[in-house]
Image (cartoon, helix red, strand yellow):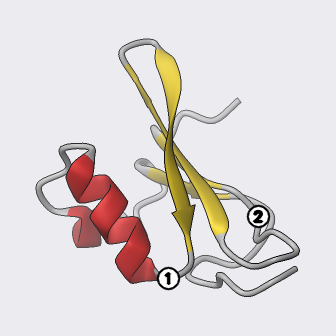
């Protein structure tokens, strides 16, 4: 189990990564990101005032199953 509230799953076969945020005691699916820009938009929509600042902070974001910032098909 992760302690990071934001999880970016491994790239799918079609490309893109599922993004979830843990808040209010549950996981909420934010969408499928195809770029860092998509991820920033999702996090802004979830209420993060400075999403660019947390993308590389392991206390906030867990990148699963692939390198951070890679969104191409697995």
Q: Secondary structure at mark 2?
A: loop
Which of 44 and 63 lies nearest the eye of the viewer? 44
Locate residue 23: give its quadrant. Answer: top left
For residue 49, above or below residue 71: above
Quadrant that contains the N terminus:
top right
Q: Measure the alpha-carbon separation of dots 1 and 2.
A: 13 Å
Badge 1 marks a residue whose secondary structure is: loop
Query: Marks 2 and 1: in contact by CB < 8 Å?
Result: no
Q: Position of residue 35 (x, y in %)?
A: 50, 82
Residue sticking out furthest to the left: 49
Coordinates of residue 34 in the picture (x, y in percent): 56, 78
Question: Percent x, y for residue 6?
Answer: 47, 46
Which label sits on residue 6?
Answer: none
Which residue position holds label 2?
A: 10
Name which residue lies at 60% across and 76% down: 68
Q: Is residue 69 left or right of residue 65?
A: left
Q: Is 11 displayed left or right of 70 in the figure? A: right
Badge 2: few (under 14), some or many (20 or more) residues near its Cα, within 10 Å?
many
How many residues crowd mark 1 within 10 Å: few (<14), some (14–19), many (20+)?
Answer: some
Which residue matches tag 1?
Answer: 35
The part of the image, by quadrant, that contains residue 11 is bottom right
């Amino acid at each position: 189990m992760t302690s990071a509230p934001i999880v970016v799953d491994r790239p799918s076969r079609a490309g893109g990564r599922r993004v979830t945020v843990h808040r209010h005691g549950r996981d909420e699916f934010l969408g499928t990101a195809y770029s860092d820009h998509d991820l920033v938009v999702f996090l802004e929509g979830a209420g993060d005032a400075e999403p660019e600042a947390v993308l590389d902070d392991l206390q906030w974001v867990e990148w699963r199953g692939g390198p951070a910032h890679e969104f191409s098909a697995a």
